[in-house]
Amino acid sequence: MAPPVNMHASAVLVGDRGVLVMGASGSGKTRLALALLREATVHGRLGRLVADDQVLLSAAHGRLVASAPQAIAGLCEIRGFGVAAIAYEPACVVDLLVRLAPAAQAPRMAAGRRETLAGCAVPVLELAERDASGAVLAVTALLFGADANGSTSGSMSLSEKPATPR
């Protein structure tokens, strides 16, 4: 088994889905991770930090697994506040990779792309950096489905694209 790869990213568990957030420094990875945790709580789902700033990625049984380096497990750096200890899970299977990019480079709709990390292919959602509120809507709609009012319910396959609005 290959040793875990340390990546500059954040990872969270939202309900039963693992989300890995990658982007340049200052792109809003932690802000999006915290917004996803808050959204999970609002909708009665489990929301837990897995890792902030550094994520160890490894493959297990063909699935990508994210975990925190022991020294930072349960810690989250919040800009303007500092480091905070928050509820966390030691690891999660990654179901979705969110790549934060400059707004001018982020596609307007999900492209159904996959990316290989640690030998495992995972669905990728490219979103505008520093727009946590917009990103939360896109991530939860993709993970859990959404009705016309924006309420999430049920589950959507990550290989499916959301329906085009009428």
Image (cartoon, grey):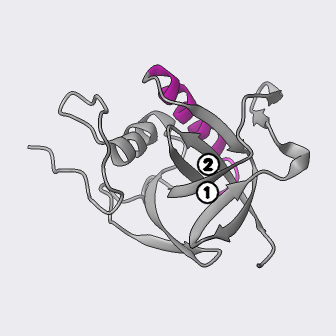
Tell me the SS state at disc 1.
loop
Judge whether residue 67 can be spotted in this image: yes
From the viewer's perspective, is 114 left or right of 155?
A: right
Neighbourhood count class around disc 2 (C-alpha, 10 Å): few under 14, some 14–19, many 20 upward: some
Outermost residue to the front:
61
Three-letter amino acid code at disc 2?
Ser
The image's mark for residue 23 is 1
From the viewer's perspective, is 136 left or right of 158?
A: right
- How many tags in the picture? 2
Q: Residue at x 60, y 39 (%)?
A: 33
Residue 122, position in %: x, y? 49, 67
As measured in the structure, the alpha-carbon distance from the residue carrying label 1 to the one carrying label 2 is: 6 Å
Question: Which image quarter is the N terminus in?
Answer: bottom right
> Which of 64 and 105 lies nearest the eye of the viewer?
64
Three-letter amino acid code at disc 1?
Gly
Residue 138, position in %: x, y? 37, 44
Tell me the SS state at disc 2.
loop
The question of residue 92 being in magenta is answered with no
Outermost residue to the right:
71
Q: Residue at x 16, y 50 (%)?
A: 164
Query: Which region is colored magenta?
Result: 21-42
- The secondary structure that most of the magenta stretch takes on is helix
Cβ–Cβ under 8 Å for marks 1 and 2: yes
Judge whether residue 99 can be spotted in this image: no
- The residue at which mark 2 appears reads as 27
Quadrant in the picture for residue 34: top right
Q: Residue at x 53, y 35 (%)?
A: 36
Outermost residue to the left:
166
> Which of 122 and 103 lies nearest the eye of the viewer?
122
